[in-house]
Amino acid sequence: MWTKTRVTSALGIELPIVQGPFGGGNSTAALVAAVSNAGGLGSFGAVNLAPEDIKRTAQDIAGRTSRPFALNLWVPIAGQDDALISEAELARIAARLRPYFEQLGLAEPRMPERFAQRFEAQAEALLEARPPAFSFVMGVPDRAILAAARARGIKTLGTATTVDEAVALADAGVDVVVASGSDAGGHRSSFLRPVEASLVGTMSLVPQVAVAVGVPVVAAGGIADGKGIAAALALGAEGVQIGSAFLATPESGAPEVHKELLGTPRARLTRLTRVFSGRHARGIENELMLALADHLDEVLPYPAQNWLTSPLRRAAGAAGKAELLALWAGQNAASARRLPAAELLRTLVEETDQVLRDPRLRPRAAPHGA
Ligand SMILES: Cc1cc2nc3c(=O)[nH]c(=O)nc-3n(C[C@H](O)[C@H](O)[C@H](O)COP(=O)(O)O)c2cc1C
């Protein structure tokens, strides 16, 4: 049975299907629990959560499901995440966004004490909260954090965008490697080489990662139906991580206008852009993305740009203004269906069963006389 793999046994789940975590407010405990209760691995993107909120979120999810789930963090990239931004520089960049802030009735941003949460404090809170699984992107956490996770029985999933990153994660002792192709929605998590030099599609990345590492591999990027799952398994993956298709479910925290665009032809028009957060991420083209793309010298590095645009994106979501949102989506987001999460999961399993039963996939017997 295709559903029994080293991923399901490592994580203690029934189906080798991970609901991709969504940072930036798009994760909900309801979505995570719905997926986990239906046999997959629900994941909560906790990158923006303060340590105490990480603990609260873990409790909230544990109150809704007794099955395994994952909390997800972003590992800081040394030399990138710690750039010093002066007040004058912040004001210069904020000026470019002023018309949009005004349009949404938002006040001028004021220099904060920090642009993002401290990873070390988040990781400490996560370890204390002891979720069944800890998934992460953008790097390899310190050896001590991984050892502490192991000691607490927390399974780890590290994300690779290249074979070298997969090997680095496997060498560090992660339980599962998520191979995230450049088709995927949301941020590229490349940490060994620049994003532009690490754009490998899922179809090329997964089979190479699967032979390069001894740990089981989960394929991510562009998977939205049973055909994609069957293809990932054929490439050597032992599980899949699906983002955009779960973002479209009623349980996800994405703004309604964002969900409405997933599953439509417009969702075919995605680009990698760093205008929203300062770091490359894939989303559907919209007015704000295209307008800011003409002024890339007026984009701060991550996390400052992310901090600067987040009130704008939050307000745009609440006001239903899709043109001012970051419409994160993968290259196959147009195939997303607006089904409740558990129903989507059931549909994915049925479709995969069907594809794998298709006689055209069986190796043909050699013709007589051959
Ligand atoms: C809105 C959005 C937010 C995301 N945030 C995160 C995140 O915080 N951490 C992470 O590991 N992956 C994140 N991802 C990536 C997904 O978890 C998943 O790997 C990816 O969406 C798979 O590609 P697909 O969208 O083509 O299915 C995000 C994706 C989207 C669409």
Image (spheres, helix red, strand yellow):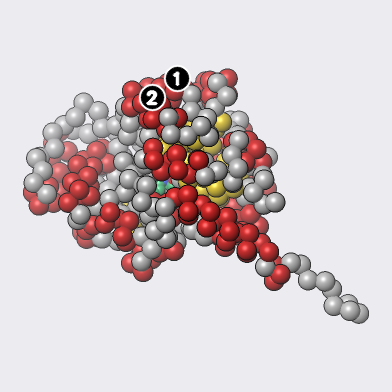
Outermost residue on the bottom side: it is 369
Image x and y of residue 301, in percent: 29, 41
Outermost residue on the right side: it is 369
Q: SS for tag 1?
A: helix
Residue 135 appears left or right of 262 = right
Which residue occupies the foreground of this view, 345 or 274? 345
Residues at discs 2 and 1 in contact (Cβ within 8 Å): yes
Image x and y of residue 290, in percent: 24, 60
The residue identified by callout 2 is: 55
Q: Is residue 244 above or below residue 150?
A: below
Residue 125 appears left or right of 231 = left
Question: In the image, what residue occupies the spot 27% across and 50% down?
Answer: 255
Q: Amino acid at mark 2?
A: Lys
Question: In the image, what residue occupies the spot 44% across and 50% down?
Answer: 341
Q: Quadrant of residue 143?
A: top right
Q: Is residue 164 above or below residue 338?
A: above
The disc label shown at residue 7, or none: none
Question: In the image, what residue occupies the spot 63% across and 64% down?
Answer: 355
Question: In the image, what residue occupies the spot 67% across and 52% down?
Answer: 2
Q: Amino acid at mark 1?
A: Glu
Which residue occupies the foreground of this view, 136 or 360? 360
Which residue occupies the foreground of this view, 224 or 145? 224
The residue identified by callout 1 is: 128
Q: Is residue 201 above or below residue 32?
A: below
